[in-house]
Image (cartoon, helix red, strand yellow):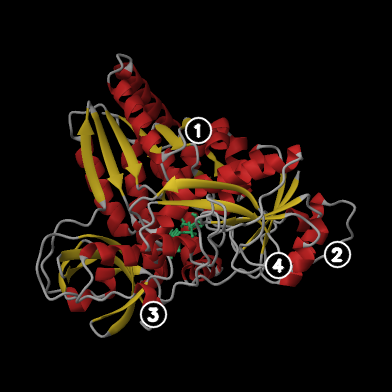
């Protein structure tokens, strides 16, 4: 079928649905829902059989839904309506939640139901639930709705609150007062829940040292006492605030009137105010565990962004893991993201963005080099969450890359102002996938699913759909590898390969060449990278859909169309 994805932005859910529909052989094109005129024009140009709206912030114009079937993904159970579905589900401590695919009509979220999926709730942020349970549920629901439409004969179910399987309600937008923290009364669990309900956005508005800040990235803190709400300690990037029954850690803040009004580590925002406070353990960032000859290195960096300092700490942790008497090291990343490369927010907030970009890429490269040069262990990158840009190539530095089947990779840098990229990708990629595919992967500028990445050789294996099943299966594989008699042979073959590659062209030369290009991106006359990074960090809305996604606007793909039409 010809399917148009009409979406507010090409977020992780839209990317996943795009990948899944294309994998099934559908012809998919994308249009950002910028205004009615643009959306109507997209429909006229593409003439889709079906419109799927994975992530919308406005109603679909009548001119579209009255003439074509439009299926809207709503992150709520049957009958749930309104713009804050998941926020309310967290605030109301729902035990089960769901995703419903609704046919657009004149009333928001009240159309006929094509499919619906439920899942148990997890104690996690709204963004994490969205990237995991909601995304998996949405894929199942959208694919079954599309199959029902293709097969014909299916009648979608009108919304009827009398039915026993319709548990949802219409709810308003969550306002800041609905999640405001009452530090004198709310216990730690309540504070955590309120912050998680607004994390990634919009955050919970609060005041810290007289500043209006939004709070994100909350975790249970140690059993300390203090005046409720008071900042009593620091833990890595987080500040520790006392509650009525203990404490919580807050990892990230947005100081909305500050010099840098975007998300930053809390101790960066409150550097001077918290400098005198004691430093505690507890913020869950880098951790290491061992099991049956395998070392598992977790790095749960918020949003997958890796600053110079974080790369340095991770590199030290990796070197330490390598000194252990294990056979295999698995680089686990975090649950939601494995890595998204350079920490663009930290770079944006630096005195010299060019210098900080330079330090950051060198710090990632140092880590990549350690992974590539590891001779004592077989290294595995295990991606249960997505990876983007340099994060994908950093993963490829390991001997093996295993991904969860729902993972989305964005193995390209160009969207960040034509960044050339480093992480030794010019060495790693052609060696793994060949020159021709390397060009295709990096120039494609499209998200890629695990199956496609596996077919191209970018990853070695793709298995299991849920995070729990993936972790259980990867542990089994890694432990079997550690126990494999062939391991010694694998290690010596790998060492010989490295020596041969080094003779062919030293690793340092790849790095020099990549960094020469990156230096131009950071310090050269063309400011594209700095502009793109600013737009990304400040979340400047896109004014048009990139031609790589909006196939219906690509004149090269529409030979019959007259140049200029629809532009
Ligand atoms: N640095 C800082 N923050 C980052 C980041 C990075 N490299 N990559 C993602 N984020 C943040 C986003 O700003 C967003 O923040 P929010 O919590 O305030 O909403 C959050 O992570 C999720 O990212 P989002 O873009 O909404 O996720 P997505 O799944 O829709 O898209 C990517 C994933 C990787 C395509 C997209 O995040 C991206 O392009 N990131 C930049 C990658 C990059 O160019 N890195 C630098 C070169 S190595």
Quadrant of residue 38 within the rendered picture: bottom right
Counting from the top left corner in percent of width and height, residue 142 is at 62, 46
Name the side, left or right, on which 383 lies relative to 167: left
In whole angstroms, how far apart are the C-alphas of marks 2 and 1?
Answer: 43 Å
Q: Position of residue 23 (x, y in %)?
A: 64, 38
Find disc 2 in the rendering and name its residue. Answer: 565
Q: Nearer the viewer, mark 4 or mark 1?
A: 4
Are the residues flagged by discs 2 and 1 in contact, CB closer than 8 Å?
no
Secondary structure found at label 4: loop
Which image quadrant is residue 239 in? bottom left
Q: Is residue 182 above or below residue 189?
A: below
Residue that numbered label 1 is attached to: 431
**Image height check: is 193 above or below 549?**
below
Q: Is residue 389 visible?
A: no
Q: Is residue 335 left or right of residue 314?
A: right
Residue position for label 4: 106
Q: For numbered disc 3, what is the local secondary structure?
A: loop
* Residue 275 appears in the figure: yes
Disc 4 or disc 3, which is closer to the eye? 4
* Picture residue at 42% right of the left edge, 53% below the top: 129
Quadrant location of the N terminus in the rendered image: top right
Camera-side residue of 531 and 235: 235
């Amino acid at each position: 079928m010809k399917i148009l994805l009409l979406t507010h932005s090409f977020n992780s859910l839209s990317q996943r649905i795009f990948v899944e529909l294309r994998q099934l052989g559908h012809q998919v094109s994308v249009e950002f829902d910028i205004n009615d005129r643009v959306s109507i024009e997209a429909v006229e140009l593409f003439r889709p059989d079906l419109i799927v709206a994975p992530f919308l912030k406005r109603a679909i114009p009548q001119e579209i839904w009255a003439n074509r079937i439009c299926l809207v993904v709503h992150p709520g159970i049957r009958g749930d309506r309104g713009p804050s579905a998941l926020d309310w589900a967290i605030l109301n401590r729902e035990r089960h939640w769901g995703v419903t695919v609704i046919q657009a009509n004149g009333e928001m979220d009240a159309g006929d139901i094509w499919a619906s999926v439920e899942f148990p709730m997890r104690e996690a942020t709204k963004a994490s639930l969205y990237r995991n349970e909601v995304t998996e549920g949405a894929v199942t629901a959208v694919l079954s709705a599309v199959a029902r439409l293709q097969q014909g004969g299916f009648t979608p179910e009108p919304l009827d609150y009398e039915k026993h399987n319709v548990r949802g309600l219409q709810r308003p937008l969550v306002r800041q007062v609905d999640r405001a923290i009452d530090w004198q009364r709310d216990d730690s669990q309540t504070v955590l829940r309120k912050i998680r309900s607004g994390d990634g956005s919009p955050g919970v508005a609060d005041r810290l040292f007289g500043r209006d800040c939004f709070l994100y990235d909350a975790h249970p803190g140690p059993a300390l006492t203090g005046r409720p709400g008071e900042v009593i300690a620091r833990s890595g990037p987080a500040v520790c605030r006392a509650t009525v029954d203990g404490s919580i850690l807050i990892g990230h803040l947005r100081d909305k009137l500050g010099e840098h009004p975007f998300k930053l580590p809390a101790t960066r925002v409150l550097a001077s105010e918290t400098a005198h406070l004691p430093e505690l353990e507890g913020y869950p960032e880098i951790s290491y565990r061992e099991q049956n000859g395998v070392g598992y290195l977790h790095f749960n960096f918020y949003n997958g962004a890796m600053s110079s300092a974080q790369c340095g700490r991770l590199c030290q942790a990796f070197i330490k893991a390598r000194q252990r008497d294990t056979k295999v090291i698995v680089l686990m990343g975090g649950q939601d993201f494995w890595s998204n490369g350079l920490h663009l927010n930290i770079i944006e907030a630096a005195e010299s963005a060019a210098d900080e970009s330079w330090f950051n890429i060198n710090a990632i490269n140092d880590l990549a080099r350690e992974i590539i040069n590891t001779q004592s262990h077989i290294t595995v990158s295990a991606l249960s969450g997505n990876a983007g840009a340099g994060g994908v190539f950093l993963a490829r530095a390991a001997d093996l890359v295993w991904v969860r089947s729902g993972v989305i990779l964005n193995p390209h840098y160009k969207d960040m102002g034509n960044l050339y990229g480093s992480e030794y990708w010019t060495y790693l990629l052609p060696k793994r996938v060949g020159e021709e595919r390397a060009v295709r992967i990096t120039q494609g500028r499209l998200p890629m699913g695990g199956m496609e990445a596996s077919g191209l050789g970018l990853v070695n294996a793709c298995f299991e759909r849920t995070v729990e099943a993936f972790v259980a299966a990867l542990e089994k594989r890694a432990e079997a590898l550690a126990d494999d008699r062939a391991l010694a042979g694998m290690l010596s073959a790998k060492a010989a390969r490295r020596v041969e590659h080094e003779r062919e062209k030293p690793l340092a030369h790849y790095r020099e060449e990549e960094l020469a290009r990156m230096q131009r991106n950071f310090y050269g006359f063309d400011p594209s990278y700095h502009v793109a990074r600013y737009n990304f960090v400040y979340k400047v809305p896109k004014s048009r859909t990139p031609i790589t996604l909006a196939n219906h606007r690509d004149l090269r793909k529409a030979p019959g169309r007259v140049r200029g039409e629809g532009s």
